[in-house]
Image (cartoon, rainbow, N blue to C red):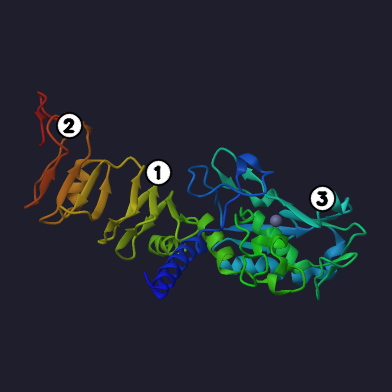
Amino acid sequence: MKPEKTFLILLILVIASSMIYGQRIFRPIDPNNGGARYGKSPYSGPPFLYFGSNSYNYKIADSLYNYHLSYVDAAFTSWNNAGQVQFSRTSSGLTLTAQAQDYNSWGPAWSYPSWNGSTYELTPVSGSIVLNSSGNVTWSHTEQHLNATPHVLDVQSMVVHEAGHIHGLAHPLTDSYTHDATAPTMAGGDNAYFDNTLDVRSLETEDVYGTQFLQLRVPNLYSSLNNAVSIANAIGVGYVYVDGSCTLTGNISIPSGVTLTLLPGANVNFNGYYIEPTGGTFNIQNGSTVYLTNGDNKYYGLFTSIQSAINYASSGQTVQLQARTYNESASFSNKSNLILQGQGKRRHCIKQSNLSYQLKLYLH
Ligand SMILES: [Zn+2]
């Protein structure tokens, strides 16, 4: 093999691996191990963290930070601009305080995101961010020098990082950003670039993807399911949850890497549109067992009864029954050219309770 060929092949491999890795370095915090420096991978199964609301408050509990007020606000605004969750400063809410601690054991700043263990929801309304006011730290809003004595730390840079933990993000699992201007803000002091710049005040792409990953819940945080699915696809790993009522505003494809879950109680008004898994997963947990299709992979409606599907169906469509016993009567009057399709012989049993005798119809 000629040397040029070897080089070309290696180059392609490097580019391919960095593209995959580059989209997946953010990590949500593991609520079952809050002290862990690094979070649980979104690939390793539940628990997945997400917000229960899109509106939270924070307050500055220590007058020491009044001087830096606009910079604290700017730090939260960065996260507000990155997604649907909105923080606003009021007299209540999660606290931002100063504490004099031993710098060496506590670090210059830290945060305590709280969470609801039964629903896996973050509840940052009761979280707190602490900025260390010991003699080893001088707080600034014009410069940042970790190597100086005492340390000079930029309030906005620190708060934007700690607010990221409040958002449920851990430090990313990578050491590839040791001196990298494009490293995520959540890399914090692990990135040597952090030392002498105010550039880390602003979020990087991975920070934005990280918080959007945690927020992929409809309709609480995204009114449009279409928008949520497209964001899930863009960030490379997507678990979109629907836990209320939402209306489709266009056809939805669920691409590879995205799982769309209808949680118990979720209701989707298809509004004439369809949902089609095109490599991704459609996880229907809302109790629907009757699906309306065109005989293909597109879902035009989900129902809990055969009759409601028939009523909604158009000519030529297929009413697909999932395997279970259907204890209902159904009328096809005023409908034509509909297909009633089951999952196979002896997997269905339709009981018509309005008859004096019970008719069992096996579909296959
Ligand atoms: Zn941190």
Residue 159 lies, in percent from the top left, at: 73, 63
Give the label, 3 or 2, closer to the camera. Answer: 3
User: Which badge, 3 or 2, is on the more N-terminal residue?
Assistant: 3
Q: Which mark is residue 106?
A: 3
Residue 106 seen in render:
yes
Discs 3, 2 touching: Cβ within 8 Å: no
User: Which badge, 1 or 3, is on the more N-terminal residue?
Assistant: 3
Residue 277 lies, in percent from the top left, at: 29, 55
Name which residue lies at 60% across and 54% down. 173
Residue 129 seen in render:
no
Q: Which mark is residue 265?
A: 1
| Residue type at tag 1 | Gly
Q: Secondary structure at mark 1?
A: loop
Q: Residues within 10 Å of mark 1 (few under 14, many from 20)?
A: few
Q: Nearer the viewer, residue 209 or 112?
A: 209
Depicted 76 relative to depicted 4: above or below = above
Depicted 293 relative to depicted 159: above or below = above
Cα distance between the residues tagged 1 and 3: 44 Å
| Residue type at tag 3 | Trp
Residue 16 sits in quarter = bottom left
Which residue has dot 2 on it?
A: 347
Residue 181 lies, in percent from the top left, at: 65, 72
User: Which badge, 1 or 2, is on the more N-terminal residue?
Assistant: 1
Depicted 34 relative to depicted 153: above or below = above
Q: Nearer the viewer, residue 304 or 334?
A: 304
Q: Which mark is residue 151?
A: none
Give the label, 1 or 3, closer to the camera. Answer: 3
Residue 347 lies, in percent from the top left, at: 17, 31
Cα distance between the residues tagged 1 and 2: 26 Å
Q: Residues within 10 Å of mark 2 (few under 14, many from 20)?
A: some
